[in-house]
Image (cartoon, rainbow, N blue to C red):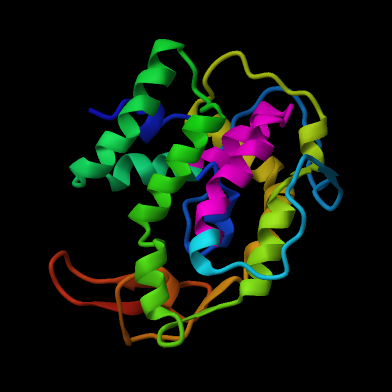
């Protein structure tokens, strides 16, 4: 059984989930105490990132996404920012695997590790696992995406490489030490999300145009990333064909 640490805790990791293919991603969720500066995301402190690559094939891009973001988060001094960034991955991985036993098994070590050490934030390895599972839940897997590229999805390999390079650089807010001693409540997370919105959006911005959907509203789809437009999602009754529908 997936614990609240995975399904509801102050939670793919991953700014990548804010920026890559998850148009109507869950609202980022943070807590309230200490004061990390908001709106300071335009400046980033560099961490040990790999040398810039001019292009990345989609399989390499997806495989680098969670570990790159999670390595950056591991070195971040600001627990509030960690909560805001990792929450979407935890929510997606937790709730999205309820009917997927094989993915639940991938989460078991994360669940066990966080529970045994009484942590509400994942470490680098756990964060990477959460991010990878969240991408699978969202249908963001290399083989399935490669089959859609050039048909219902466009992919920019140069922007993908730039995205990975930028995710290796910590947002400015990470330089401000903020320690959360207790697990934030939902209302606290919402407050943190608003406080650090500018930082998170700036961090994710270089990744926003890696994928783009080409299916107009009303067209057939399988996953959100195929739909054209920021507020359009792939929806449909369970077991039936899905179509791209505007949010609301």
Q: State the residue at coordinates (82%, 43%).
A: 46
Q: Position of residue 92 (x, y in %)?
A: 39, 47
Q: State the residue at coordinates (50%, 26%).
A: 185
The answer to whether residue 65 is magenta is: yes
**In this orientation, which residue lies closer to the viewer: 186 or 44?**
44
Q: State the residue at coordinates (34%, 53%).
A: 137
The answer to whether residue 246 is magenta is: no
Q: Which image quarter holds the N terminus?
A: top left
Extent of the magenta region = 61-87
**Is residue 226 placed above or below 136 in the rendered structure?**
below
Whether residue 78 is visible: yes
Whether residue 202 is visible: no
Q: State the residue at coordinates (78%, 24%).
A: 177
Residue 45: name its quadrant: top right
Q: Is residue 137 left or right of residue 118?
A: left
**Is residue 75 placed above or below 145 in the rendered structure?**
above
Q: Is residue 232 left or right of residue 99?
A: right
Q: Which image quarter holds the C terminus?
A: bottom left
- What is the total number of numbered labels drawn onto the structure image? 0
């Amino acid at each position: 059984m997936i614990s609240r640490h995975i399904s509801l805790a102050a939670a793919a990791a991953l700014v990548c989930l804010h920026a890559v293919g998850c148009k109507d991603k869950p609202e980022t969720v943070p807590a309230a105490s200490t004061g990390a500066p908001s709106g300071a995301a335009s400046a980033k402190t560099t961490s040990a990132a790999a040398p810039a690559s001019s292009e990345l094939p989609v399989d390499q891009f997806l495989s680098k996404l969670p570990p790159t973001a999670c390595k950056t988060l591991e070195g971040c001094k600001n627990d509030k920012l960690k909560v805001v960034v990792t929450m979407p991955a935890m929510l997606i991985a937790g709730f999205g695997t309820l009917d997927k036993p094989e993915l639940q098994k991938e989460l078991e070590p994360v669940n066990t590790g966080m529970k045994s050490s009484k942590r509400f934030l994942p470490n680098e390895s756990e964060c990477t696992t959460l991010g990878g599972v969240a991408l699978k839940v969202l249908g963001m897997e290399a083989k399935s995406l490669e089959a859609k590229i050039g048909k219902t999805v466009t992919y920019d390999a140069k922007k993908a490489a730039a995205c990975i390079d930028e995710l290796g650089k910590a947002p400015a807010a990470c330089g401000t030490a903020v320690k959360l001693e207790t697990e934030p409540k939902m209302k606290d997370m919402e407050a943190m999300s608003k406080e650090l919105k500018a930082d998170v959006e700036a961090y994710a911005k270089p990744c926003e145009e890696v994928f783009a959907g080409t299916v107009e509203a009303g067209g057939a789809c399988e996953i959100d990333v195929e739909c054209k437009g920021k507020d359009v999602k792939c929806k449909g009754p369970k077991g039936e064909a899905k179509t791209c529908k505007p949010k609301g």
